[in-house]
Image (spheres, grey):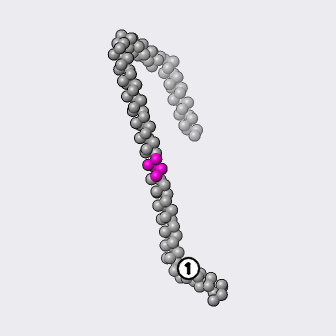
Amino acid sequence: MNKQTVSASTEKASVSNPTSAGARTGDSIADSVQTLVDQGAETLGTIKARVTEATDGARTQAARVVDRTTELVTEHPMKSLAIAFGIGYVAMRITTSKLTSLAMIAGTVYAGSRLLRS
């Protein structure tokens, strides 16, 4: 058989049996999808590990801060009370100020307009 006869018979075989060509394409797509799923699962595992690590670090740091604050309050109760009162007074003055209310409204309008533009 010459080359033309072989290619012609190959073309006839692929045309006469479209399911085998479709099955190969389907298998190829299935393999690609499975590869993407596997890569996604691996990436998700990495992200979960990083988030868990960051969460554990934040919890440890927060526990240290709470412990240190408790120690300082126990050592200096009057000073702690005065600081808490001062912070509360300043916070009250800031939140009840008309200028602060105006600034909050202006900030909200500005942020809203930026969101609508994007």
**Where does residue 99 sit, x and y in percent of width and height?**
51, 18
Q: Is residue 89 visible?
A: no
> Which of 106/12 is in front?
12
- Quadrant the N terminus occupies: bottom right
Q: Is residue 7 visible?
A: yes
Q: Residue at x 57, y 40 (%)?
A: 118
Main SS category, magenta section: helix
Quarter assignment of residue 50? top left
Q: Residue at x 39, y 33 (%)?
A: 59
Quarter assignment of residue 65? top left
Task: State yes or no: residue 43 in magenta.
Answer: yes
- Tell me the amino acid under the disc marked 1: Ser
**Where does residue 40 sit, x and y in percent of width and height?**
47, 53
> Which of 89/60 is in front?
60
**Where does residue 33 sit, x and y in percent of width and height?**
48, 61
Q: Residue at x 41, y 29 (%)?
A: 61
Above or below for 91 versus 25: above
Task: State yes or no: residue 35 in magenta.
Answer: no
Residue annotated with mark 1: 14
> Which of 12/105 is in front?
12
Above or below for 41 versus 7: above
Quarter assignment of residue 63? top left
Above or below for 48 versus 18: above
* Span of residues in magenta: 42-46
**Where does residue 62 sit, x and y in percent of width and height?**
40, 29
Graded by Cα atoms within 10 Å as few (under 14), some (14 to 19) or many (20 or more), the crowding at tag 1 reads: some
Q: Secondary structure at mark 1?
A: helix
